[in-house]
Amino acid sequence: MRPTFSFDFATTRWLLAAVAGLPLLAAGWGCSGSSSLPTIPVHGQVTYNGQPVTQGTVTFLPRETTDGAPRRPATGAIQPDGTYRLATLRPDDGAMPGEYQVVIVSITSGPSPEAPAAPEVWAIPKHYGNPLQTDLQATIPADGKGPLKFDFTLQDSTTAPRALPSGSSFQET
């Protein structure tokens, strides 16, 4: 005689949810603890016309992969005093070593549900927020010891200075 199994809808639904959730649980285990991807703490300040930029984001976009290793962008929120701290995998962990295109976005107002046709108003020249137009670059050295400081002094011209770490022993060659 063959055994018979009887599942009601609630049991079937619970089993399906458990099976579907296993990959997510396994992925979560891989994300906890320390990461095998090296990051170096990075912070700095953004100014425009001699004043701190008081809101927005700073994003370091990888220019290329290094030795086939995965590269991820690093992003930091600009604080009211113009400072930022980058995060790649965890808050304030910094950026991975490599070459970066730097994009800075600071929009003070724009479209909203009340005014959908309102134009965006930028606190800085708009070209800094476009990866195809900004000239801002940064290099995180593979042998760098953090924290590294990258200050960005923004100008009205489309030619922007290259950012270099200040207060570190790194020298650009």
Image (cartoon, helix red, strand yellow):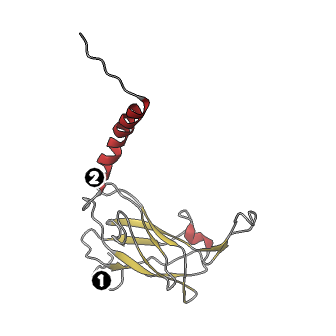
- In the rendered image, which quarter contains the C terminus? bottom left
Which kind of residue does numbered mark 2 sit on?
A: Gly
Residue 36 picture location, percent across and down: 24, 59
Compare residues 9 and 165 and report the one nearer the observer: 9
Residue 17 picture location, percent across and down: 39, 39
Tell me the residue at 33%/77% (across/down): 172
Q: Residues within 10 Å of mark 1 (few under 14, many from 20)?
A: few
Tell me the residue at 55%/90% (across/down): 50
User: Is the residue 99 above or below the residue 28 in the image?
Assistant: below
Mark 2, secondary structure of its residue: helix
Tell me the residue at 57%/81% (across/down): 155
Which kind of residue does numbered mark 1 sit on?
A: Ser
Q: Nearer the viewer, mark 1 or mark 2?
A: 2
Residue 15 picture location, percent across and down: 35, 35
Q: Is residue 68 visible?
A: no
Precedes in sequence: disc 1 or disc 2? 2
110 left or right of 67 in image: right
Say which mark, if any, is on residue 123: none
170 left or right of 137 in image: left
Mark 1, secondary structure of its residue: loop
Task: Find disc 2 in the rendering and name its residue.
Answer: 30
Residue 90 picture location, percent across and down: 35, 65
- In the rendered image, which quarter contains the N terminus? top left
118 left or right of 151 in image: right
**CA separation, marks 1 and 2?**
33 Å
Say which mark, if any, is on residue 168: 1
Q: Residue furthest bottom?
A: 50
Q: Is residue 74 visible?
A: yes
Q: Quadrant of residue 95?
A: bottom left
Q: Residue furthest top?
A: 1
Q: Quadrant of residue 116?
A: bottom right
Q: Residues within 10 Å of mark 2 (few under 14, many from 20)?
A: few
